[in-house]
RNA sequence: GCCCUCGUAGCUCAGUGGAUAGAGCAAAGGUUUCCUAAACCUUUGGCCGUGCGUUCGAUUCGCACCGAGGGCGCCA
């Protein structure tokens, strides 16, 4: 898809090529530093070296030789030492960008680069019979955002919640429930009780071997399809999904599939047989199946000596299933950094087995969450923060601010806005920076409403909507008084207007970049800069009281486009926007 | 011992071959008869962890070291 800025780049490139002074492969136009008053620059160092002239000289000569077509987007060409700088034509910029944003609407920023290709995104993946906590929320939020981004880029996306519903841990749950009885509570409370059962049983298990045997027995019975074990397992899965769904709904998280680890159980034998047949693994004397060390990847097991399978075995089966079922171009796992080695081993093994050579296997890793004292969050330490409580707390704090800032809103709207703002703050906390970083759980910072925060972005959107609402009320019509008339939009030549327009033009590039880097924060950054640019515009350029009716219309159009683009950006992050706040 | 991630302003982070390294928070000061002050403006604040190399040019690439976090056979 060719948006305005793409066309500008194409035109600059073509104009430079047409001079015949720079070889095609040395035309490396790039975005200049922010303090340079230009939209694109050509550093002439390499071409000058090849031509045997000084870079500033080449830059000057190129400036003279450049020929631009009549309807070009290029407004100004300037020589700055060794750099040849290009700026967009102010009137063209306004007309073309606003046309892009308003005619594409909700799909402004979308692209067709993924056309015909499938991306599988695995995220969230909480354990059954446990409450979701801050650890899961990172995977959930980052994954949902990446899923949104790839869909916008034209990929066919398949999202999968790889539920932790199998393994030895489940034998413990079964044994504990059989002994102590099923929790009678509902939702997260039932999960909390299950956690308590699990913890108590595990603790006792360490001292009483009989309990350990009992857990293993249940684990085996489950694998063998024992009806009672199976029923209890299904019940646990159901109440977990039910409780989680409430959280997912609030976060706007959806999945195409929730297969879970158990889904792959019947494929274990084939996986092990295939690994052995391909020579990627061997059977050790003690009966275990070993994948030997290779390329500094330490050896690991595919099967225990007692015949049991492992997380890795199921993950290999999962890859093979996905390849067969969806024929993806890319599989993306959103899982914490501690599992980095696991995924490198997994990917290497799958390839050694002869699969996925033309498929990108990607582990998008994220850092650990620490508490204010720098301690990792854990149930054992008692500093764990659970998702539902986190969201409730965030919404409550947002509500308190609304009472103070905007007490006249109707009750229902107050609650709605509090939910949007509170949840948005939690989501943004996981997306505003590079996911690889460890984060410290700081309530005040996470829920702060100024600076680079979700609230600031939502506030900017609400201000835009407020202006547009008043404009339609004044006019007594339903239609916003905007225009796509180039002559009118040419009035947008104030620095704040031009700066905002330029930035709106960068949105499609931000979406592509976010996709290429698996980095939602690129979009968060774009949204933040948009809000700041709008803030300046808001101060400097009166809209409803603009000097002339034409300028008023032009500015209203800019406001409408800003609101639209900001909404699109926040949507990709999974953050909703309020009309008022 | 080996492997991975991170090290940029007091704090939290962008920038990752090119022009004077940017934001927010914190600190100090200013702006509201005017579209939402949950806002805007100004000021203060940097041997870009250290060293050596590659390059016309390095915060960005390579190597070594230092510091922080994580990982390395029968858990997930």
Image (cartoon, helix red, strand yellow):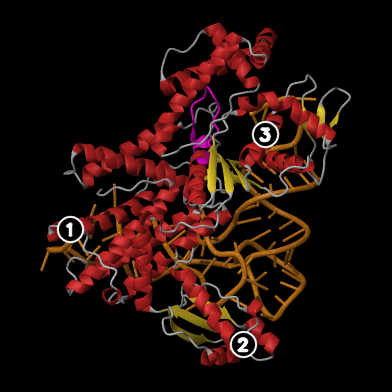
Q: Give the CA separation, mark 1 to mark 3.
A: 56 Å
- Nearer to the camera, A425 or A246: A246
Task: Please name the residue that numbered disc 2 is placed on.
Answer: A20
Question: Which residues are the magenta region?
Answer: A124-139
Q: What residue is rendered at 62% in x and 21% in y?
A: A169
Q: What residue is rendered at 45% in x and 54% in y?
A: A524
Q: Tag 3: Cα neighbours inside 10 Å, few (<14), some, or many (≥20)?
A: many
Q: Is residue A372 above or below residue A150?
A: above
Q: Is residue A275 above or below residue B68?
A: above
The answer to if A234 sits in the magenta stretch is no
* In-image side of B15 versus B30 (left or right): right
Along the polypeptide, which appears first: circle 1 or circle 3? 3
- Nearer to the camera, A48 or A196: A48
Q: Please provide percent x and percent y for residue A320.
A: 69, 36
Q: Please provide percent x and percent y for residue A383.
A: 49, 31
Evaluate whether label 3 is on the same chain as label 2. yes
């Amino acid at each position: 898809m060719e948006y305005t800025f793409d066309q500008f780049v194409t035109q600059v490139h073509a104009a430079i090529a047409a001079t015949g002074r720079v070889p095609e492969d040395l035309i490396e136009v790039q975005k200049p530093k922010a303090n340079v008053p230009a939209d694109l620059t050509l550093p002439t160092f390499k071409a000058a070296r090849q031509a045997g002239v000084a870079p500033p000289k080449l830059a000057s000569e190129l400036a003279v030789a450049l020929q631009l077509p009549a309807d070009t987007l290029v407004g100004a060409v300037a020589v700055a030492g060794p750099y040849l700088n290009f700026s967009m034509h102010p009137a063209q910029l306004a007309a073309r960008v606003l046309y892009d944003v308003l005619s594409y609407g909700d799909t402004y920023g979308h692209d067709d680069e993924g056309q015909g290709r499938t991306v599988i995104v695995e995220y969230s993946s909480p354990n059954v019979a446990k409450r979701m906590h801050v650890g899961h929320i990172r995977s959930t939020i980052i994954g949902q955002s990446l899923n949104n981004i790839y869909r916008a880029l034209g990929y066919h996306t398949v999202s999968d919640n790889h539920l932790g519903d199998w393994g030895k841990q489940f034998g413990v749950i079964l044994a504990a429930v059989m002994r102590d009885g099923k929790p009678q509570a509902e939702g997260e409370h039932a999960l909390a009780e299950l956690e308590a059962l699990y913890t108590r049983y595990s603790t006792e298990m360490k001292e009483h071997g009989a309990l350990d045997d009992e857990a293993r027995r249940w684990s085996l019975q489950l694998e063998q399809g024992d009806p009672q074990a199976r029923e209890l397992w299904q019940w646990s899965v159901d109440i977990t999904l039910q409780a989680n769904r409430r959280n997912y709904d609030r976060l706007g998280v959806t999945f195409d599939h929730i297969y879970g680890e158990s889904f792959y159980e019947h494929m274990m034998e084939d996986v092990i047989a295939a690994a052995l047949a391909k020579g990627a693994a061997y059977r050790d004397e003690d009966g275990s199946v070993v994948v030997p060390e290779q390329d500094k990847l330490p050896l690991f097991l595919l099967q225990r000596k007692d015949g049991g399978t492992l997380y890795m075995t199921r993950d290999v089966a999962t890859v093979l299933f996905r390849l067969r079922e969806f024929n993806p171009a890319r599989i993306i796992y959103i899982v914490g950094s501690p599992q980095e080695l696991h995924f490198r081993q997994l990917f290497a093994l799958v390839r050694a087995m002869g699969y996925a050579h033309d498929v990108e296997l990607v582990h998008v890793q994220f850092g650990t969450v620490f508490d204010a004292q720098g301690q990792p969050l854990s149930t054992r330490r008692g500093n764990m923060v659970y998702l539902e409580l986190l969201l409730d707390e965030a919404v409550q704090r947002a509500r308190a601010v609304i009472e103070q800032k905007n007490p006249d809103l109707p009750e229902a709207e107050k609650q709605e806005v509090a939910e949007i703002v509170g949840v948005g703050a939690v989501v943004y906390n996981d997306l505003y920076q590079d996911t690889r970083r460890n984060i410290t759980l700081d309530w005040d910072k996470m829920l702060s409403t100024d600076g680079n925060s979700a609230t600031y972005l939502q506030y900017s959107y609400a201000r835009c909507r407020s202006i547009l609402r008043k404009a339609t009320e004044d006019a007594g019509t339903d239609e916003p008084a905007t225009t796509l008339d180039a002559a009118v939009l040419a009035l947008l030549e104030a620095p704040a207007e031009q700066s905002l327009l330029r930035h709106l033009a960068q949105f499609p590039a931000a979406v592509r970049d976010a996709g290429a880097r698996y980095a939602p924060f690129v979009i968060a950054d774009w949204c933040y800069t948009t809000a700041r640019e709008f803030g300046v515009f808001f101060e400097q350029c009166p809209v409803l009281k603009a000097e002339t009716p034409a300028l008023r219309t032009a500015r209203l159009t800019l406001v409408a486009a800003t609101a639209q683009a900001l909404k699109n950006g926040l949507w990709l992050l999974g953050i909703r926007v309020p009309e008022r706040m």
